[in-house]
Image (spheres, rainbow, N blue to C red):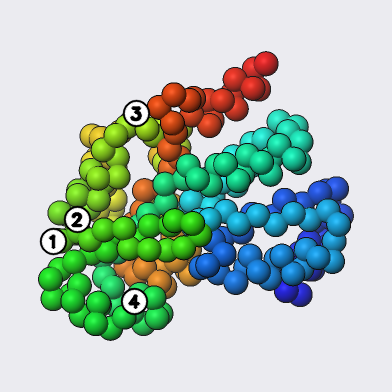
Amino acid sequence: MEDYERFFAEKLTEAQNIIHITMAQHISAGYKNACEAAKSFENVTVIDSGHLSSGLGLVVLCAAYMAEHHASKEDIIKSIDRIGGYVSSAFIISNTHMLQQSGRLSKHIQVLCDSLLLCPVLVLRKSKMTVGSMKIGSFWRVAKSYIKSTLWDPRNIDKSILFITYSGLDTKQLQYIQNLVQQYCHFERVYLQKASSAIACNCGAGSFGLLFLRKDDDTLSFFQALKQLEEK
């Protein structure tokens, strides 16, 4: 908590208000500590993004875009609460040993995954990490299955930005993933993002995720809406 207090105090020398967006509260103690630290200030707002890694990054990008275009504090906070529900945040785990060692997966499940060549897909929902599905087979097979099931309906996808966030993948594997993504959905910008040390320590080598924004069929994508607002 003391680290957050020092951080907020330093940033308030540069700005009148702080909107601090944290990792999902049920995954990290950051949200709780930031909320406690914010009680010492009148102009610090802490928001749970509900996500981690590049999923959190997408929420921050949207908020930063609004701030740069002079949106009010209230409008930014309201939009952040809405945006979190549209972030698609999921990772496929190639090796479950690291998850078991960190206590996020039981030894029984880990042995079962090894025996049956099962690769879990971890999904962020309501600020919690859950197993969304299981894929079976080699890296090449499970990667194709995961990408196909994630991008199966391009009409419901905001194609502005895609993060391919990965841990311990080589150039050949990354190119294979990019080629598969292009087959199912064409994004305007694709970023290959190496996972942070914390994420890599939990997911292990050979893991990756596709992180992007979804949209309603009857609405513009979030970034398209912001661009129209900017033009007005």
Task: Report the residue marked by disc 3.
Answer: 155
Few, some or many residues within 10 Å of mark 1 (<14, 14–19, 20+): some
Badge 4 amino acid: Leu
The reply to whether residue 207 is visible in this rendering is no
Name the residue tied to disc 1.
Answer: 137
**Tag 2: Cα neighbours inside 10 Å, few (<14), some, or many (≥20)?**
many
Label 1's element?
loop
Q: CA distance from mark 3 to mark 4?
A: 34 Å
Query: Could you tell me which residue is drawn at 15 percent across and 61 percent down?
Result: 136
Marks 2/1 in contact by CB < 8 Å: the verdict is yes
Q: Position of residue 90 (x, y in %)?
A: 37, 54
Residue plotted at (68% across, 44% down): 77
Compared across the picture, whether 229 is left or right of 176 comes to right
- Could you tell me which secondary element the residue under label 2 belongs to? helix
Mark 1 and mark 4 lie on one chain; the one further toward the N terminus is 4
Number of the label disc, if any, that sits on residue 216: none
Q: Are marks 3 and 1 in contact (CB under 8 Å)?
A: no
Judged from the image, the secondary structure of the residue bearing numbered disc 4 is loop
Mark 4 Cα shell of 10 Å, populated few (<14), some (14-19), many (≥20)? some
Q: Earlier in the sequence, mark 3 or mark 4?
A: 4
Q: Which residue is mark 4?
A: 105
Which three-letter amino acid code belongs to the residue tagged 2?
Val
Tell me the quarter of the picture where residue 9 sits: bottom right
Residue labelled with disc 2: 142
